[in-house]
Image (spheres, helix red, strand yellow):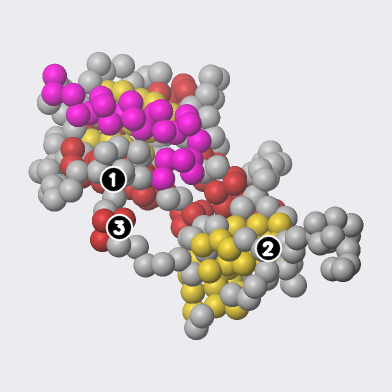
Amino acid sequence: MYGEDVLAGNWRRRKVTPEVDAEPDLVVEDADSGFCGAVVGFEMGAVVLEDRFGKRRNFPLLPAAFLLDGQPVTLRKPAAATPRQQTRTRTASGSTAVQGVTARVARASRIWVEGIHDAALVERIWGDDLRIEGVVVEPLDGIDELEHEVAAFGPGPGSRLGVLVDHLVPGSKESRIVAKVTSPHVLVTGHPYVDIWQAVKPAAIGIRAWPVVPPGRPWKEGICAALGVAEPADMWRRILSTVRSYKDVETPLVNSMERLIDFVTTEN
């Protein structure tokens, strides 16, 4: 009387495309153009994506217009966060955030890093913690004169010095320079990467791995050439903009910085 059983035969349930909040840094692909990038904002009702070369494009929030992990999705603009949701419970370093606390007066102790890029990255991740502890981070112009600069600083029990060194591996020039610093009031730690750029996880900036730069070629210029970026300054802005927390950098850097902070904030 009713014909074919609707629960049998060729009947199929229509597949529903999932809706996904277009949260910042979510990486998706536009299904029509193939443009792949991270969500960086919204303009005139469209989502703004930025690819790994820093190019930005706007795409309307149409049904099933994007691919996430290869699967069609419908992006939607996230609802505004409530005041409770906006309250940070963790700092970028993973520490418990302390609300309503002003920065402590600067200690005599210091942390030195090799350059302004190192200082900017440290500030991005550990800035909240360092302000509460009253620790000032100062950039050096390399570490070739580290032994003399440490002597001029005059470290002591109340004025400890922590130093973060790039490419601190056995047999390197850096390891020989560091070996000359013997004060018990100085702690030198480091990471194995050629430059602080390389301490940022490749996935954070949308690449599978850092390019290999041939010996004899300036490293930063080689990286820019391999990734199609005109100037190191442009590449650095792109790198720094992708770092949100300690999860975006390699573990050796995190461990080294945590050791330095503990060392310079110890009272005796």
Image point 63% across, 76% down: which residue?
Answer: 62
Q: In this view, does 57 lie to the left or right of 115?
A: right
Q: Residues within 10 Å of mark 3 (few under 14, many from 20)?
A: few
Q: In this view, does 218 lie to the left or right of 80?
A: right
Amino acid carrying mark 3 in the image: Gln
Residue at mark 3 to residue at mark 1: CA–CA distance = 9 Å
- Identify whether 75 is placed above or below 146: below
The segment highlighted magenta reads 245-268
Residue at mark 1 to residue at mark 2: CA–CA distance = 36 Å
The image quarter containing residue 201 is top right
Question: Residue 16 got which mark?
Answer: 2
Among numbered discs 1 and 2, the one appearing first in the sequence: 2
Residue at numbered disc 1: 89
- Let me know if residue 240 appears in the view: yes
Instruction: Say which of marks 1 and 2 sits in front.
Output: 2
Quadrant showing the C terminus: top left
Main SS of the magenta part reads helix
Instruction: Say which of marks 2 and 3 sits in front.
Output: 2
Query: Does residue 123 show up magenta in the picture?
Result: no
Image point 12% across, 43% down: which residue?
Answer: 104
Q: Answer whether labels 1 and 2 touch (C-beta < 8 Å).
A: no
Task: Between residue 197 and residue 61, name the one nearer to us.
Answer: 61
